[in-house]
Image (spheres, rainbow, N blue to C red):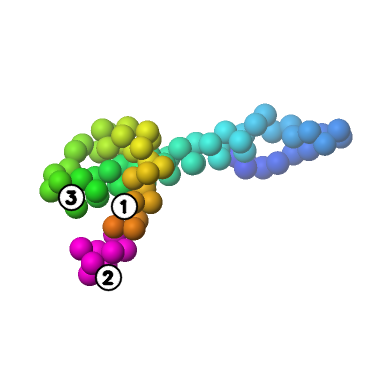
Amino acid sequence: MFFEVKFKENGRSSNGGKIGCGCFIAVLLINIIAGAWSVNFLLTTFGKTAIAYVWAALIGLIAGEITIPVAVIVKILKLCGAF
């Protein structure tokens, strides 16, 4: 199983780092998806245009720490009628 944890006698994990790698890949995929959504959402909200998903994903990887929270705040404000 991919997320199975086995321990040796000395307490060290014997799964070869599968959990750490799986978590890193999951976080990276979430960052790519959320980053691409946030970049395209902000571009369509303020610029009335969107870019290809691949380019939005690359921009989201770099600027995701800023664009994801801003996009969530703008989405909430749009749902409340402020925009």
Q: Is residue 63 visible?
A: yes
Q: Position of residue 49 (x, y in %)?
A: 14, 44
Q: Provide the major secondary structure of the magenta segment.
A: helix
Residue at 27% over, 67% down: 79
Give the residue at the far bottom of this rendering: 80
According to the image, label 2 marks what residue? 80
Q: Which residues are magenta?
A: 75-83
- The answer to which of 24 and 79 lies nearer the viewer is 79
Amino acid type at circle 3 is: Phe
Mark 1 and mark 3 lie on one chain; the one further toward the N terminus is 3
Residue at 74% over, 34% down: 13
- The answer to which of 25 and 66 lies nearer the viewer is 66
- The answer to which of 12 and 6 lies nearer the viewer is 12
The answer to if 82 sits in the magenta stretch is: yes
Label 2 to label 1: alpha-carbon separation: 14 Å
The answer to if 42 sits in the magenta stretch is: no
| Quarter of the N terminus within the rendering | top right
Cβ–Cβ below 8 Å for labels 1 and 3? no
According to the image, label 3 marks what residue? 46
Amino acid type at circle 2 is: Cys
According to the image, label 1 marks what residue? 71
